[in-house]
Image (spheres, grey):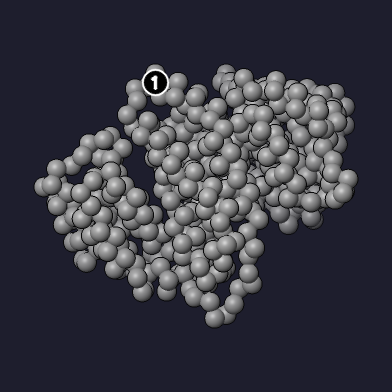
Amino acid sequence: MTKEIELKVRLNEANLPALIDFLNQVATPADHSTLKNDYYDTPACALSKAKAALRIRHAEGGVEQTLKTRGQPQAGLQIRGEWNWPLSSPALDVSLLEQAEVQNAWPAGVDAKTLAVVFGTHFERQAWLWTDASSDTTIEVVIDQGLIVAGELEQPLLEVELELKQGNANLLWTLVAQMQSVAPLWISDISKAERGYRLADLAPQWQAKLPVFCDQRMAEALPLWLNAEMNALQRTLEQAIWAEEREAAVAAIQHVQGLRQVLSWSGRTLKRSATKELRTALETLRLAIWELAKNAAQLEDSSWSAECATWQQNSTLASALLNASRALYELPWPEVEEASSHVGRALLRHWLPDDLARRFEQASAINNWPDLHEAIVQMLVITRYAQAADRKSGWIKTAVATRLVLTGMLECYLFDEEPNADDLNLMASEFRHLITA
């Protein structure tokens, strides 16, 4: 088994010539190939549910069978197990999956005999090798352009992958930042396999999940917490700008605020000076995403589609997302100390209900309605964290209803519908009732 470490980005096709010219200058052109890939799964899509992918690739040099196991996202990098086997024929060889090393990573209960083709990806691949002699680092850059095919359905494919072949993984960020200077590049962790399952209507709706629980120590939870929020932010922005999903633009507000909120709680674990670059990038993201979300709420369908095409070319937002991802990846994480506080103690027991009440009371006292939006989003984030962290707390039972009230207020802001004093007082009264119930 090898360990694949890669960074994936996508771009607007109009920027492709400029990016190719740049790569020809800074890297050595390598192979150009035509690749036809068939992806296999069980009738119940057991591999997809286990975050694994099995394919047979047809290329000019022969046929290859590949298995990739569940990935581990870190800010924007993907790290996952991978096996590659050359084949003498294009038929799936299930005996290769019975090897002891493979079985250790093979999803439990998956019967290899039931595997069959569920979709395909067919594309042209251009490749370059970028090297840094001082660190003995080699990175392969590939541009894949073609189609994803599921039955009679087709979807265009255009993405760029940077894969570490040897050396320092940090230089993946260095190279992609150089590439960003000639074309807006958007970090993406959505694999070709996931896109194929979506096209075949076999993929469950992706949902943001927080791997945080009350009995975790903050120093242990923070890397998981921040990486989960960054992953959710990357995905919701991609869904909004590239798939034109309006709800995703609104969800992105909460994820960027979530990252800022968690950083504000990390003072005893991370020095503020260590998070300066991340906080700066998040502030740029926050301002741009508010504009994106308001456009998503207000524009007609035809205008929204054109707006999304414009945002694909927005280098400020794309660069801020890249900078935030890199800054998170490079954070200096301390050792977990036994004396460090627990998530539950910090989040729920001491200050959460009082903090919510205080934030809302302060926000309600502001005469200028648009100024309420920051407090509203903060409260939405906190209630979401509370639900995820402790599902047994009696107070958490009110969190769902609380979020409904706050979401209604957020929608008023996005649609520029200023509530009158009676409406605001009613929402304030209902919120107080919920958190004191």
Q: Is residue 196 left or right of residue 139?
A: left
**Image coordinates for residue 296, horizontal then vertical, percent:** 38, 31
**Image coordinates for residue 392, horizontal then vertical, percent:** 36, 68
**In the rendered image, the vertical position of residue 398 relative to residue 376, given as above or below:** below
**Image coordinates for residue 143, horizontal then vertical, percent:** 72, 28
Q: Which residue position holds label 1? A: 303
Q: Residue at x 42, y 74 (%)?
A: 345
- Looking at the rendered structure, the kind of residue marked 1 is Ser
SS under mark 1? helix
**In the rendered image, the vertical position of residue 363 relative to residue 294, given as above or below:** below
**Image coordinates for residue 434, horizontal then vertical, percent:** 22, 60
Q: Residue at x 50, y 68 (%)?
A: 267
Q: Is residue 379 left or right of residue 40?
A: left
Q: Is residue 362 left or right of residue 282?
A: left
Q: Residue at x 60, y 45 (%)?
A: 323
Outermost residue, bottom side: 339
Q: In front here: 278 or 119?
A: 278
**In the rendered image, the vertical position of residue 38 relative to residue 343, given as above or below:** above
Residue 235, can we see it? yes
Q: In which image quadrant can residue 145 be found?
A: top right
Q: In front here: 46 or 70?
A: 70
Q: In which image quadrant can residue 433 be found?
A: bottom left
Q: Is residue 298 left or right of residue 88?
A: left
Q: Residue at x 13, y 47 (%)?
A: 421
Q: In which image quadrant can residue 312 be found?
A: top right
